[in-house]
């Protein structure tokens, strides 16, 4: 909401960094809205989060580098304390307990990236000769919290940030602050010793075995298999990619052991995922932005150190750690981390502009345009942007409320709110799937063929919206198998087999698809083949009760 007022108070500047970022975000929006064969609202939020955080930080860098950074450091410190409590006591886990701290995040790796975004600037601040015991203590606290994550990607980010700082600060700064470097080294060793001793007592689980194993024998998490599949997709869709967040669909078709039972959404390398989903054009624009950043860091290094541009050095150290972590994980797909990266990038951009880097001032908004005041126009644009960005969220809330009403036996209102969600986001396949299920259940319960026909049409529309999503296809198959005699145009046996083979081609290793395949074979009269496929499924999933029940059903028939 501050964007309109920013334009009136200060002329925005176009720099090489901002030009590359705007080009990258624009390409991402075009990809999501027009190029990608599927639609994912996350693509809109990806671009808008990064761009708005960048613009706000560029225009409010003075506040962010003082008050804003203090608030951010306090929040990170609280998260670090939370992580330490989890590791030391086993308390404070939101979901299930783990040997690795999570704090409020889903995975330890996200926590590690978050901690590094606070640790690296604080560490750099202390090593550049600023701050006293409080900053030193905060540094050790954040380092200890990072160790609780036991994240190899987090350690890589820490090491990369330290190496960048040492290189950028130079020998003269290191010699001048040698006592601080020695204090940090001793403090880090003391923290490591405490962790090792605490684990030796058997009070917690912590070790560096995974790190040493990776250094000695390479990665042991089978991520190279994911990378290989991603590389294959890049060469198949070289320039524009397969579309934002479509790696999950691609992986379902091409996945190999040991991932046959897992649904992987991330490549665990943001650069490979960007190249796969946005093509070389998208990756090129992102790398161009990084070249603009680090190229100007090299160009203005001496001036930066002479003027002690702490906001620039601290921000560059922070993004370096995140960029390194992105080589082995997916921090750029986490909204909070993406926003933090945009803020740091905006601070860097404004520091360069303030130091005299090439830039072009954009004209201020005229006081009046077409007889309307600029303030009114700006507010109208902001409201319009908020409404547009809010559509996916409004649709999600509407669908959630519809599900709530349906569970409380208010099917009509549930159906109404689901239709609202589908109207707000007509390219999101899951809303067709949810509404189709409700219509089918109502049609079956009330013996109304018209609702069953409408359910069939809704599922078909969902297939058109997202041809790679199998949920609508599976429900359409179940509808024709169970209630085909009540439909105006029931599917033929050939149609049933064609549809289920299409589902198998999209998710060949899915248990749900395999079960539907068995049911369809039994439905069209291929009982022997259905029994054989059901036995294979039970053999592969001996603990899967639904598969055993399906085998009994087709065998009995």
Image (cartoon, rainbow, N blue to C red):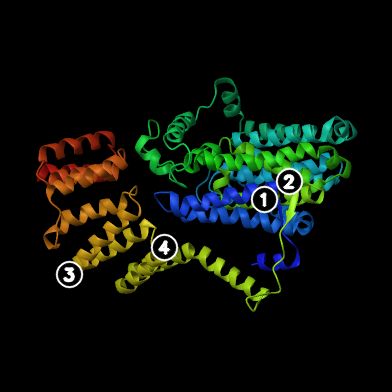
Distance in Å between CA atoms under marks 1 and 3:
58 Å
User: Does the rendering let one see residue 71?
Assistant: no
What residue is disc 3 on?
Answer: 448
* Number of other residues with Cα within 10 Å of mark 4, as a class: few under 14, some 14 to 19, many 20 or more: many
Residue on which disc 1 sits: 18
Residue 287 visible here: yes
Q: Residue at x 17, y 48 (%)?
A: 496
Q: Secondary structure at mark 1?
A: helix
Cβ atoms at labels 3 and 2 below 8 Å apart? no
The percent coordinates of residue 305 (x first, y second) are: 85, 40
Between the residue at mark 1 and the residue at mark 4, the CA separation in whole angstroms equals: 31 Å
Q: How far apart in space, not on screen, are marks 4 and 2 (Cα)?
A: 37 Å
Can you say which quadrant of the picture contains the N terminus?
A: bottom right
Q: CA distance from mark 3 to mark 2?
A: 63 Å
Residue at which label 2 appears: 315
In the displayed image of the protein, which residue is found farthest to the right? Answer: 176
Mark with earlier residue (2, 1): 1
- Dot 2: element: helix
Of labels 1 and 4, earlier in sequence is: 1
In the displayed structure, would residue 545 be above or below residue 368?
above
The answer to whether mark 4 and mark 2 are in CB contact below 8 A is no
Q: In the rendered image, which residue does mark 4 sit on? A: 425
């Amino acid at each position: 909401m501050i964007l309109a007022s920013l334009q009136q108070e200060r002329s925005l500047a176009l720099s090489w960094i901002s030009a590359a970022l705007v080009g990258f975000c624009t390409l991402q929006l075009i990809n999501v809205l027009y190029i990608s064969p599927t639609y994912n609202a996350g693509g809109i939020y990806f671009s808008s989060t990064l761009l708005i955080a960048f613009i706000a930080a560029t225009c409010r860098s003075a506040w962010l580098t003082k008050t804003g950074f203090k608030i951010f450091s306090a929040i990170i410190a609280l998260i670090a304390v939370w992580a330490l409590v989890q590791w030391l006591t086993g308390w404070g886990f939101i979901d299930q307990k783990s040997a690795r701290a999570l704090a409020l995040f889903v995975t330890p790796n996200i926590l590690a990236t978050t901690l590094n975004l606070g640790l690296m600037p604080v560490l750099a601040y202390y090593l550049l000769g600023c701050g006293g015991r409080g900053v030193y203590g905060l540094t050790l606290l954040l380092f200890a919290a990072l160790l609780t994550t036991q994240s190899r990607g987090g350690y890589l980010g820490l090491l990369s940030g330290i190496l960048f700082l040492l290189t950028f600060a130079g020998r003269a700064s290191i010699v001048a602050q040698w006592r601080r470097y020695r204090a940090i080294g001793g403090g880090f060793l003391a923290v490591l010793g405490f962790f090792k001793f605490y684990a030796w007592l058997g009070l917690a689980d912590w070790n560096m075995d995974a790190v040493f194993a990776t250094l000695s024998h390479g990665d042991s998490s089978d991520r190279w298999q994911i990378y290989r599949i991603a590389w294959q997709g890049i060469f198949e869709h070289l320039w524009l990619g397969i579309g934002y967040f479509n790696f999950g669909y691609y992986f379902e078709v091409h996945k190999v052991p040991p991932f046959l039972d897992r649904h992987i959404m991330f490549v665990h390398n943001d650069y490979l995922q960007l190249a796969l989903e946005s093509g070389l054009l998208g990756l090129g624009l992102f790398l161009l932005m990084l070249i603009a950043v680090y190229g100007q860091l090299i160009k203005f290094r001496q001036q930066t150190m002479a003027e002690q541009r702490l906001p620039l050095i601290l921000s560059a150290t922070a993004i370096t750690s995140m960029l390194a972590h992105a080589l082995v994980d997916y921090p750029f797909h986490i909204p909070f981390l993406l926003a933090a990266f945009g803020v740091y990038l905006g601070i860097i951009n404004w520091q360069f502009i303030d130091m005299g880097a090439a830039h072009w001032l954009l004209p201020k908004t005229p006081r009046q345009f077409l007889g309307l005041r600029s303030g009114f126009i700006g507010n109208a644009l902001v409201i319009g942007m908020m409404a547009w960005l809010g559509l996916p969220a409004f649709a999600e809330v509407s669908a959630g409320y519809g599900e709530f009403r349906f569970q409380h036996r208010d099917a009509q209102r549930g159906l109404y709110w689901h239709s609202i969600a589908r109207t707000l986001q007509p390219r999101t396949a899951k809303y067709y799937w949810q509404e189709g299920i409700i219509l089918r259940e109502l049609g079956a319960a009330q013996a109304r063929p018209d609702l069953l026909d409408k359910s069939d049409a809704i599922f078909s529309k969902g297939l058109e919206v997202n041809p790679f999503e199998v949920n609508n296809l599976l429900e359409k198959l179940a509808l024709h198998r169970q209630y085909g005699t009540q439909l105006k145009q029931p599917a033929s046996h050939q149609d049933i087999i064609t549809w289920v083979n299409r589902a198998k081609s999209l998710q060949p290793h899915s248990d749900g698809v395999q079960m539907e395949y068995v049911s369809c074979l039994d439905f069209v009269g291929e009982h022997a083949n259905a029994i054989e496929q059901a036995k294979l499924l039970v053999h592969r999933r001996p603990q899967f009760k639904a598969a055993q029940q399906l085998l009994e059903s087709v065998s009995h028939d």
